């Protein structure tokens, strides 16, 4: 086997620079907020893997079961030579797609993309070993601004699974989808996984599990600030909040200060005051209505050709053509 190529468009220094900007903006804003991509250092990625196994967290297993059921149809419709997977992480669901696309006979290249070089290297090595006939070309980048760094050549399908599209607010989604559309050639494809709007009685516990793993994942962003920016947050002094915003149709996660406190972010030369009970937004996870999602794809220049939904209408996969 040939060792997989790894293009690094995002170094550790770049990450720190981006975090500095995000943290300075978010911690001095009113209300305070931090972008969810900063959950995912090694510990955060591990906590997320544990979330996917929680009884309450239905999205991962729902999407996986759906993918298992329809992956043959996807492969037949896509006839892709290159599979680009955005935010591939541990590439757990990838094998389903790779098996179907290699069985279908068209696939030559797999391009996993992730912000985490360590997660990517591990996944790329494993996939390269398991699929000796596939050329594996990893890209370490931030999916929102490095689409043009994706390798070209061969009919491509970009897969963006897991419902991570929901981390973006509508204006960011529009920009992101249009950006993907722009890098694709006519006839190339986008496979998008998205969580659907369902009963909040099922949604909320998925983001506020009984075992407290999601709470720990949420507080991990403070560990990341402590490590990367030499801050002194006391994560245990923040409560996990998950609520359903019915108007925006998204889950919102927040960290609530249990008492008044001041944190020092040495790396930013910044002190941050929290009032007792003050809440800081750390993530939105938007859920979708199928017609509205199709409209967003259309608006970005895509033609949705297929949609598949699980039997409980909790999650959808949609295949669109540029
Ligand atoms: C990885 C963004 C799809 O929004 O469901 C899980 C992240 N946050 N539990 C999601 C997450 C809290 C997850 N995504």
Image (cartoon, rainbow, N blue to C red):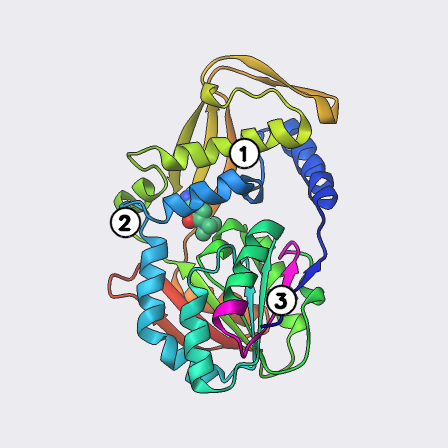
Per the model, the C-alpha gap separating discs 3 and 1 is 31 Å
- Does label 1 or label 2 sit earlier along the sequence? 2
Q: Whole-percent x and y of residue 64?
A: 35, 63
Q: Is mark 1 within 8 Å of ligand 1?
A: no
Kindly state the secondary structure of the residue where label 3 is placed: loop
- The residue that appears at 57% across and 80% down in the rendered structure is 108
Q: Nearer the viewer, residue 290 or 9?
A: 9
Callouts 3 and 1 close, C-beta under 8 Å = no
- The residue that appears at 56% across and 82% down in the rendered structure is 81
Question: Where is mark 1, residue-wise?
Answer: 221
Q: Whole-percent x and y of residue 312?
A: 25, 61
For residue 197, say whether it is visible. Answer: no
Q: Whole-percent x and y of residue 277?
A: 46, 19
Dot in front, 1 or 2: 1
Kindly state the secondary structure of the residue where label 1 is placed: helix
Q: Is residue 274 left or right of residue 277?
A: right
Callouts 1 and 2 close, C-beta under 8 Å = no
- Does label 2 or label 3 sit earlier along the sequence? 3
Residue 264 falls inside the magenta stretch = no
- Does label 3 or label 1 sit earlier along the sequence? 3
Per the model, the C-alpha gap separating discs 2 and 3 is 43 Å
Write the start and end of the magenta stretch as one range: 128-144
Number of marks in the image?
3
Question: Where is mark 3, residue-wise?
Answer: 4
For residue 271, say whether it is visible. Answer: yes
Question: Where is mark 2, residue-wise?
Answer: 199
Kindly state the secondary structure of the residue where label 2 is placed: loop
Q: Alpha-carbon neighbours of circle 3 within 10 Å: few (<14), some, or many (≥20)?
A: many
Q: Is residue 70 above or below residue 18?
A: below
């Amino acid at each position: 086997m040939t060792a997989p190529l790894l293009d690094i468009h995002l170094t550790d220094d770049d990450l720190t620079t981006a975090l500095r900007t995000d943290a300075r903006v978010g911690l001095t804003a009113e209300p305070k907020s931090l972008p969810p991509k900063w959950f995912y250092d090694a510990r955060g990625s591990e906590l997320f893997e544990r979330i996917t196994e929680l009884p309450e967290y239905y999205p991962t297993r729902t999407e996986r079961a759906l993918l298992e059921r329809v992956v043959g149809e996807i492969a037949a419709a896509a006839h892709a030579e290159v599979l680009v997977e955005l935010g591939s992480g541990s590439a757990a669901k990838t094998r389903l797609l790779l098996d179907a696309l290699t069985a279908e006979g068209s696939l030559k290249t797999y391009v996993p993309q992730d912000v985490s070089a360590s997660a990517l290297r591990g996944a790329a090595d494993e996939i390269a070993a398991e699929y000796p006939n596939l050329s594996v070309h990893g890209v370490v980048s931030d999916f929102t601004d490095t689409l043009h760094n994706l390798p070209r050549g061969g009919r491509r399908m970009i897969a963006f699974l897991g419902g991570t599209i929901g981390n973006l607010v509508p204006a960011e989604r529009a920009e992101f989808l249009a950006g993907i559309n722009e890098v694709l050639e006519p006839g190339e494809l986008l496979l998008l996984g998205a969580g659907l709007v369902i009963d909040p009685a099922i949604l909320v516990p998925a983001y506020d599990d009984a075992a407290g793993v999601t709470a720990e994942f949420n507080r991990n962003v403070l560990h990341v600030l402590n490590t990367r920016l030499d801050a002194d947050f006391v994560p245990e002094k923040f409560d996990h909040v998950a609520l359903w915003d019915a108007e925006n149709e998204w889950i919102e996660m927040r960290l609530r200060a249990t008492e008044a406190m001041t944190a020092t972010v040495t790396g930013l030369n910044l002190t941050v005051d929290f009032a007792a009970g003050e809440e800081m937004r750390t993530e939105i996870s938007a859920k979708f209505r199928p017609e509205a999602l199709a409209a967003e794809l259309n608006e970005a220049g895509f033609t949705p050709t297929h949609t598949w939904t699980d039997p409980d209408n909790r999650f959808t996969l949609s295949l669109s053509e540029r």
